[in-house]
Amino acid sequence: MTKLNAPYLHVVYCDDVRSEIGGKITLVGIYNSDLQVPTAPVALPKLCVVSTFVVPIDMDVTQLTFKLKKDDIEIGKFETDIPEKKPTSHPLYTRWTYSNITTLSPFPIEGPGTLRAVVESNLGTFFGGGIRILVGNSEGGRHTADGQ
């Protein structure tokens, strides 16, 4: 089993998050690297941001704030309560996870830009993957992981 050495922030942008039986969630309409709209200004009925901060089990998080930034403007800030007493550890446990699900409804789009999740903690500041907001027919601006 590989040991987690450093904290990281994982982010998913989607149209909806639905609660399921058994504590599960379903993510609907997951965006890749781009959110494209034909014209602006426009408002999406809803945009959900699922942020998960993952920390090695031997690191203590004492302060945690999830933030959302549209370009350089903070549009959301969510302080997280950290339990003083951690659950009993198990040899198979390698990490702590702290999650935040944010629903922006409506989500106004004035023009192109970037939406990004950030975590600020006593361990430092961590940036999650952002999503580009594109306006118009921008097929030429789309890209894949291999740059094709």
Image (spheres, rainbow, N blue to C red):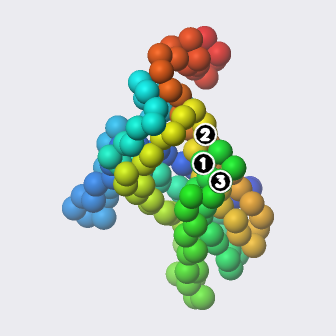
Number of numbered markers: 3
Residue at the spot x=60%, y=37% of the render?
113
Horizontal side, residue 89 vs residue 60: left or right: left
Circle 1 residue? 70
Tag 1 and tag 3, C-beta contact below 8 Å: yes
What amino acid type should be assigned to the residue bearing mark 1? Lys
Circle 3 residue? 73
What amino acid type should be assigned to the residue bearing mark 3? Ile
Which of 2 and 39 lies nearest the eye of the viewer?
39
Residue at the spot x=62%, y=69% of the render?
65
User: Element type at marker 1?
Assistant: strand
Residue at the spot x=40%, y=57% of the render?
103
Find the distance from the CA under tag 1 to the CA under tag 3.
Answer: 5 Å
Circle 2 residue? 114
**Which mark is first along the chain, 3 or 2?**
3
In the image, farthest residue toward the bottom: 84
In the image, farthest residue toward the left: 21
Q: Is residue 22 above or below residue 62?
A: above
In percent of width and height, residue 13 lies at 47, 44
Which of 70 and 18 lies nearest the eye of the viewer?
70
Find the distance from the CA under tag 2 to the CA under tag 3.
Answer: 10 Å
What amino acid type should be assigned to the residue bearing mark 2? Thr
Give the quarter of the image for residue 98.
bottom right
In percent of width and height, residue 19 lies at 27, 59
Which of 85 and 14 lies nearest the eye of the viewer?
14
Q: Residues within 10 Å of mark 1 (few under 14, many from 20)?
A: some
